[in-house]
Image (tube, rainbow, N blue to C red):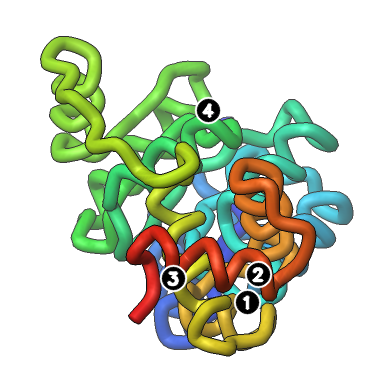
Amino acid sequence: MVTRVLVADDQTVVREGLVLLLGLIPGLEVVGAAVDGADAVRLVGEHRPDIVLMDLRMPRMDGVEATRVVRERHPDTQVVVLTTYADDESVFAALKAGARGFLTKSAGADEIAEAIARVRAGDAQLDPSVQRRLLDSMTSPKETPSRPGGLTAREIDVLRLIAGGLSNAEIAKRLFISETTVKTHINNLFAKIGARDRAQAVTYAYRNGLAD
């Protein structure tokens, strides 16, 4: 049974390398290569692959958003994340969006092929370090440091950049996320701190020691 795979990565060298690598693995057929998340969503609609090998940090639409959209629109297409970033926020966001596999770019060809095969079969495949992190979060929950207004770490990052005078486009570039994601974070943090506009958000940031 041939597994049809779509590659999504904004780095040309990585994207083309993955296409060549996957083309050498028996039982896999690369049906397309997307340059960002929005392109991945478009190509999934055209080619209906079995698996998308998805990077996370991409322009226009990041991998988390793209994963969520792909899973909502095309439930028969599964997503395996292949990324440089394996921090807790990236891992949990990707899995919550619907990814069934999560690998770092240190993975070899055999590991990638195994992840694709297992996810295609209906299982999940996670990098060992990710598995340990998930296990630790379930068996040894640590007390979460309180943050002003109940903001998440990423919302605090966005708030600090707002206080630094950055535009949405500049924040997106700095954090390697899409402008749509930035707007979502801003709407969420505004609701949590009761701010009506950026000026009030900046005032809140200074009062709570979140900006210099």
- On residue 178, the disc is 2
Residue drawn at (44%, 59%), measured in percent from left and top?
156
Q: Which residue is mark 4?
A: 120
Choose mark 3 or mark 4, whichever is in front.
3
Task: Specify the quadrant of the image occupied by residue 130.
Answer: top left
Residue named by callout 1: 59
Q: Around disc 1, counting alpha carbons within 10 Å, would you say few (fewer than 14), some (14 to 19), or many (20 or more)? A: some
| Three-letter amino acid code at the position of disc 4 | Arg
CB of mark 1 within 8 Å of CB of mark 4? no
Q: Residue at x 68, y 47 (%)?
A: 194
Most distant residue in the top direction = 139
CA–CA distance in space, label 4 to label 2:
28 Å
Q: Nearer the viewer, residue 20 or 161?
A: 161
SS of the residue under disc 3: helix
- Distance Cα–Cα, label 2 vs label 3: 26 Å
State the quadrant of the C terminus: bottom left
Residue 190 higher or lower than 115, as above or below: below
Residue type (three-letter) at the residue carrying disc 1: Pro
Which element type, helix, strand or loop, lies under badge 1? loop
Q: Amino acid at mark 2?
A: Ser
Q: Does 159 sit left or right of 133 as displayed?
A: right
Dot 3 or dot 4, earlier in sequence? 4
Quadrant where the N terminus lies? top right
Residue assigned mark 3? 206
Between 147 and 14, the residue placed more toward the observer is 147
